[in-house]
Amino acid sequence: MKKIESFEVDHNRLQKGVYVSRRDQFKDVILTTFDIRMKMPNAEALENGSIHTLEHLLATYFRNDETFGKRIVYFGPMGCLTGMYLILEGELTSEDVLPLLTGGFDFVAQYTGDIPGVSAIECGNYKLHDLAGAKQEALNYLNVLKNITEEQLNYPS
C-alpha cells in the first residue's frame, strides 16, 4: 500500500506553525488542507477536553468569518493531538490564512461566554470540555502566529 503524503513529512524536524499539507483537485475546484501544528510532534500533545473546546469555538468563529466562512470544507483535530486540520476551497498559502487563524485564536484566548454546541443534543461527547485549557492553548499558539517565521510556514524538505 502506498504511504500517504502526511507520513512523508519528517516530524522530527517539524515546528509549531501553519503548513500547507496538501492540495487536491476535484473537477475544477482545488481544496487546500492546512496543518495547524500547535504542539511539537512526539514531545507534547493537546488534552482531549482542551482540543474539543478549541474545535467548538474555532469552528464557530471560522464558519462565521466573512472571507473564509463559506469556503470551509472541514475543520477538526489531528488524531495525534498535536494540532488541527483546516480544509478550504481554493489554492491558498499559509500566509493567506494567517489573519483567519490569528483572529480565531485571539477570539478563543479572550472568550468568556458559554461554549457553543455543548448539550447532549448538539454534541456526541458534550461533557468533555475544558474552556480554561482551550484558552491557554489558544494563547500559546497565538504567540506562535504573531512571531511566525518562514520555517514555520513551509514543511521541512
Image (cartoon, rainbow, N blue to C red):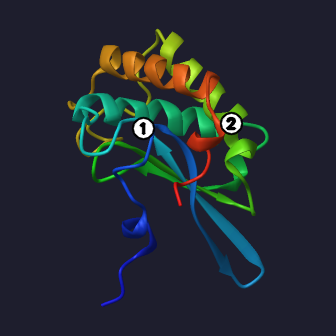
Residue 42 pos. (x, y %)? 24, 45
Identify the mark nearer the N-term, 2 or 1: 1
Amino acid at pointer 2: Leu
Helix, strand or loop under label 2: helix
Asked which quadrant contains residue 51, the reply is: top left
On the image, which quarter does residue 29 sit in?
Answer: bottom right
x 26%, y 38%: residue:
120
Vertical side of 147 occupied by 90: above or below: below
* Residue 24 picture location, percent across and down: 62, 74
Give the residue at mark 1.
Answer: 55
Q: Position of residue 1 (x, y in %)?
A: 30, 90
For label 2, the residue is: 98
Kindly indicate whether the residue at mark 1 contacts the one at mark 2 (C-beta within 8 angstroms): no
Q: Residues within 10 Å of mark 2 (few under 14, many from 20)?
A: some
Secondary element type, mark 1: helix
Given residues 119 and 22, the one toward you in this image is: 22
Q: Amino acid at mark 1?
A: Glu
Tally of numbered discs: 2
State the residue at coordinates (41%, 31%). Answer: 54
Depth check, front residue: 128 or 117: 128
> Height in image: 35 above or below 99?
below
User: Is 1 located above or below residue 78 in the figure?
Assistant: below
Q: Could you say which disc has been placed on residue 138 in the image?
A: none
Residue 47 lies, in percent from the top left, at 23, 32
Residue at 42% x, 38% y: name it.
55
